[in-house]
Image (cartoon, rainbow, N blue to C red):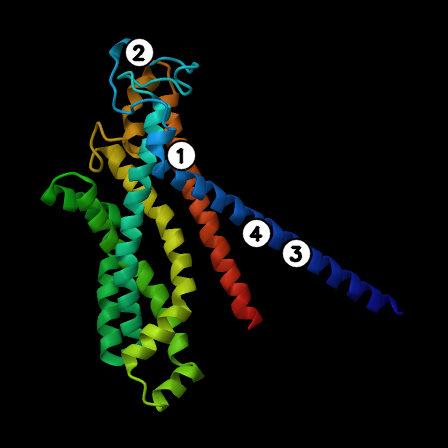
Amino acid sequence: MTLQTTHTRTTNLLTRRTWMSLRVRGNWLSVAASAILIALVLLAVFAPLVAPHDPYAVSLMDSLQAPSAAHWLGTDDAGRDVLSRTIYAARISLLGPLGVVLGSAVLGVAIGVVSAWRGGAVDAALSRCVEVLFAFPGVLLAILAVAIFSSGLGAIVIALAIAYIPYMARVTRSVALAERNSLYIQALETQGMPAWQIILRHLVPNIMPFVIAQATLCFGYAMIDLAGLSFLGFGVQPPEADWGAMAAEGQNALIQGMALPALVPGAMIVLAVVSFSLLGEGLAERITRRENAA
């Protein structure tokens, strides 16, 4: 065995071990992110059973208490239990981004598929419409919606769903174009199968993994936008529990030396957003590996 051969085999072995190490590490991150998100969803669903106190019960005598056996994370400036409000806030904080992602995914996938399937003038017109939507920042569009329809979760969810359509439409169009030119699609067209059946029964199911990966990433961004709007007072209004609104309410506690009423909801936002980002990146990486293997 020559020195060159030995060096080549050693290099290949190290490369393979490095790749497997990164792959296992990425899988563990995705699993951990999934576990955290499942825990947050369960907290939101079973909030009445898990929360130790009424999240809306005001007790000025118990204002800004430190963590204790009765209040594990202390109380806010209105004497409400921070832990209970954080648990209940998971409901709105997760439901809002879900509405944004579902609305943008339905319209974005429809636009992307029609654009890729029809091509020509239809593709050009829809692409121009998507580019126009890209010109409007989502937060600015949400503030405009609040100015027109008054503050609240519904108006900003609809506005952000419209703003997120281009992200879903572009990804859908790119993968649908590749699928549109595949041999099995051409074979189905040759057999005389109607276009709508090919799209619904074959094309859309095959591109759905890409759509899910993109939607998972968009979920985290939508959560940041909604939390920021609630922090500024455009979203969920007091006394409703929302992580962004709770962070805004906790500013007064920070001035008086109590950090938990502001830090706990902020930490929950960071935890959820990072988990969604890791899960989305893990899904995208898995899809890429599968495509390369095929």
In the rendered image of this protein, does residue 281 appear above or below residue 238?
below
The residue drawn where x is 34% and y is 18% is 75
- Give the number of the disc on residue 192: none
Disc 1: which residue: 268
Task: State if disc 2 and disc 3 touch (CB < 8 Å).
Answer: no
Residue 119 seen in the current view: no
- Report the Cα–Cα distance between label 1 and label 4: 23 Å
- Residue 185: percent from left, percent from top: 39, 82
Q: Toward the viewer: 190 or 276?
A: 190
- Report the Cα–Cα distance between label 1 and label 3: 32 Å
Task: State if disc 4 and disc 1 touch (CB < 8 Å).
Answer: no
Q: Is residue 55 left or right of residue 258?
A: left
- Give the number of the disc on residue 27: 4
Name the kind of residue labelled 3 in the image: Met
Name the kind of residue labelled 2 in the image: Asp
- Report the Cα–Cα distance between label 1 and label 2: 24 Å
The residue drawn where x is 27% and y is 73% is 114
Task: State if disc 3 and disc 1 touch (CB < 8 Å).
Answer: no
Instruction: Tell which circle, 3 or 4, labels the residue nearer the N-terminal end.
Output: 3
Q: Toward the viewer: 80 or 42?
A: 42
Report the residue that reaches farthest toward the right.
Answer: 1
Q: In which quadrant is the N terminus drawn?
A: bottom right
The residue drawn where x is 81% and y is 63% is 7
Disc 2: which residue: 62
Name the kind of residue labelled 1 in the image: Met
Instruction: Tell which circle, 3 or 2, labels the residue nearer the N-terminal end.
Output: 3
Task: State if disc 2 and disc 1 touch (CB < 8 Å).
Answer: no
In the rendered image of this protein, does residue 74 appear above or below residue 222?
above
Q: How would you rate the neighbour count of disc 3 (Cα within 10 Å): few for under 14, some for 14-19, many for 20 or more? A: few
Residue 261 seen in the current view: yes
Disc 3: which residue: 20
